[in-house]
Structures are given as C-alpha cells and as structure tokens.
Image (cartoon, coloured by chain):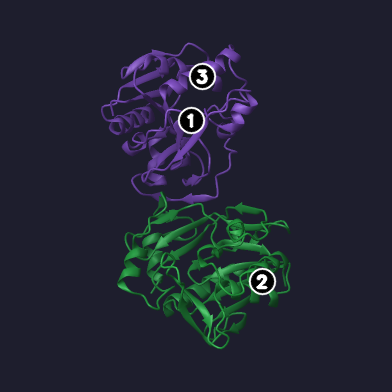
Chain colours: A purple, B green
Amino acid sequence: MKDLTILFLTVNEVPAQWAEFQKQTLLKAVGDSPIITMSMKPLDWGLNILQDRPKSLSNIYWQMLRGAKLADTEFIGIAEDDTLYNAEHFCPRPASNEFAYNMCHWSLFTWGEPTYHWRHRHGNYSLIAPRVLMIEALEERFEMYPNGTPDDRTGELGRFRVEKYLKLTPRKLKEFWTTVSIVNFQHDYSMEDYQRRHVKRRAALRAYEIPYWGRADKLVENFK
Amino acid sequence: MTDLTILFITANRVPEYWAEYHRRVLMDAVGNNQIITLSMKPTPIGLNVVQEKGHFSHASNPDYPDPHLVDSVTGEYSGFYAQLLKGCKIATTPFVAIAEDDTLYSSAHFKYRPSLDSLAYNLGRWSLYTWGPPVYSHIGSMMGCAGIYPRRLAVDMLEERFKKFKDKIPFEHFGELGRYEKYLKVTEHPVETFYSEPAIIQFNHDYFSTIPNSVEYVKRRHKKRMGFLRATNIPYWGESAELVRNFR
C-alpha cells in the first residue's frame, strides 16, 4: 500500500505489554505502508516525531496536521495506540473530497465483563483520509484556533456537528465497512473522563466472540 | 393486561421443531402482554385467528419473486399486511408489536414504545443464516419483524394503502410501515429506531416461500450477503452455531 501513510498517534501512557502487542498487530496489518509515529516519548519504529504540545484532544489533531505534512502519499490512515487493526481496514480509499470512517469497529472496555459492543459513531481511530484534504481541513481549524480547539467541541474531521460547532467549512464524510472489524479498547489511560471513571455505558449491540479477534475475555488480557 | 398486543403472524411453514422452540422463546419474551396469532393453520398461541382458505401466488414482477398470500374465496391479497391490519383491528391496546415466526425475541424488545405519531423499529437485530457458516451478522435496517407501532396509526396507514391499491398491489414497495410511503405516494410518518439489549435474532431460511421453492430461488437467496458486523457468541443467545441448530 504505497499510496497510504499510517500516522500512529500515542502519548505513551498505555501499558508496556499492550503497547508491544498493539505494535506487532499494527505492523502485521499495514504491510509495506510507511509509518510515521507521533509520540510523547521516543519510539524506535516508523519515522518517529515527538509531539510538541501537551496532551489534549486538540493536540491529537495538531499532531495529525504535522504528520500529514511530513507524509508524501496520497492517503493517510490514522492508527491510535488503543486500537487493534487488520490489513483490510487499510485498503479502502475515499474520494479526494471526503473523509472515510470504518464503521466495522467494536469497542471493548478493559473493566467489567469483557464484552464487545458497537455503536454508530465515527471514531478518529478508524479514519482513512486524502492527505491534501486532511491538511486543508486541519490548517483551517488551527488558523481559526491557533491555541487549540476547546476540548468540549473538538472532534473528528468531516463530522457535521463538530465542524458546525467550530464554524469550519463542512466537509464530506463517508462510511465504509470491512468484513473483519477493528477493535477499539476503552481504558483507564484514556483522555475521556467517563472511561477513566468506568462509568461509560456499553452500547446495546454486544458480543462475547467475534470473527478474527476471538473471545473478548481473551483479547482483553493483552491490555496490561 | 398491558398497553401492548403482540401480533404473531405465521404461515405455518417453518419446521415443526423450530416452531415449538420459537413458541417457547416467544412466550418467555412476551410476559403479560396479550398475543393475537394470525396463522394459516390452527396455532394455539394467544387468541388465534386462522385463515385456512388461502393460497400462495406469485407477484407479477420477476424481480420480486416471493409469493404472496391470496384469499382463495375472494381472490384478494391477504398476505402479511392484510393480516397485520386484521390483527391491529382486533387488538384493543394503544400499541402493537409484530412477532414473526423466524425471529427470536427478548423481553427487552417488547418494552419500547414510540410516540403516538411514530413507528418504531429495533435495530438491535442480528441475522443468522441457516445456510453457510453460522455467524450472527448485523445490518442496521428497519425490518417488519422488529416493528412496534401505535395501533391506531398502523390501522390508518394500512387502510390508506389498501384503499389506494384496491386492484393491484405494488409488491416491490409494499414493505414496512414508515419505509415505503414516499414510493407508494401515501402519507408519510416519522420513524424512531432503538436498540434492545439483548438483541433479537432474525433467521434467514428456506421456508418462507416454499411454493415453489425452486433451485433457482434457493440459489438466489443463498447469495444474500451477510452484514459486515459479525459475531459468533453474543449475550443471552449464546453461540451462533448452537442457536442455529434449533432451526429444524
């Protein structure tokens, strides 16, 4: 996948064993795509760039802008440090004027009964974007908010509500589905308070075992 | 007595073992709600309304080959939506919920109530095919088996449809209330969606249109693509490979 750069985002707070497991899973999934790792602490894989702003939701998008400018491929695939990917996820390509989100994404809490659950949402961890469009959208965002966007208004590229709140140019969002899902872990090291306090509710559509990833109670054991 | 009547609609074509299993699961799920069973053969579940003098006829459009029920005496369409209207008129509760003979329900499903001007569909619905690998798959579409309606609204909408299409029913658009009104050019109404937990399970099988059930139709049906969101073990219902064994 020479036309896609993986932008891996981490603030290096997830547990070490998990970080290694997630990395190995990601490397298997991305094939020969170049990787840019945007981290708070140095990493010895991918083209490693240290983050230059404090941890915040807005900082995620700032780092994405920096990474997108360093890349030279037509497309960018976001990889977050709490999400497990498979190769199929990185295959679809959106049109040049739209952001694409993989809707086949299970969530898995690291607390409570290990259960996959799904809700209809567009997560940054599932984004595949045209690089030029990503730069254009993020430059607009940070020109308007040079000190960063407010946490309660910050959100995914192409999401109508986010762009409306931030008074940004609305851009197209496209959904795609893969036959193998990706799995987003929700955990104690998240920036979301609901996750840290374990009060986030599971979505109604739930599963104990799914194709490719297997049983939730086994998979969750890797988060340590 | 509650505010909901379950309208169980069956053509009594599903296998006997399954029918009995389904009955037990349904009875567990309905709780105190009353049931009206609209069937082709006597079916002792709730208040049973039997339509014995009916036969299946094919729609004229080859793109929509599933047979529809015709009243052998009057020659009129008496398929699913005619049965639904009949059930809605017999019921006396403010709300009705459809129960189909190939869908397994949880009691959580029957707890939802839409507002009185809206139709509701449970999107917490897994599909399970009786052919191929046994895997639950999910498509967030609004299916009749997952419908809960204000009774009066359903009566009005169905009567409007049958009044407009007295002579020739456009089967290609004669689908779920709330989904096809713009194609049928009848009054549109709002739709609400919800997810029950536990979900409901709709089986895809070969018994809903068995006359004729030619190799060609079966082949076509078995090409149906699964939803992309998939699971093999889910809360309440368990392993898909085990659950599917009940369909026999």
Judge the density around disc 3: few (<14), some (14-19), many (≥20) Cα neighbours within 10 Å: many
Image height check: is A92 above or below A206? above
For label 3, the SS is helix
Q: Is residue A149 left or right of residue B114?
A: left
**Residue at image x 62%, y 26%?**
A153
Mark 3, residue position: A138
* Residue A106 percent across, percent down from the top left: 45, 42
For label 2, the SS is helix
Image height check: is B199 above or below B64? above
- Distance, label 3 to label 1, CA atoms, is 13 Å
- Name the subunit of mark 1: A
Kind of residue sitting beneath label 2: Lys
Q: Which of pointers 2 and 1 indicates the residue nearer the eye?
A: 2
Mark 2, residue position: B163
* Residue B212 percent across, percent down from the top left: 38, 77
Judge the density around disc 1: few (<14), some (14-19), many (≥20) Cα neighbours within 10 Å: some
Kind of residue sitting beneath label 3: Leu
Q: Which mark is residue A210?
A: none
* Residue A179 percent across, percent down from the top left: 36, 46
Query: Which of marks 1 and 3 precedes in the sequence?
Result: 1
Kind of residue sitting beneath label 1: Asn
Quadrant where the C terminus of chain B sits is bottom left
Farthest-out residue, front: B167
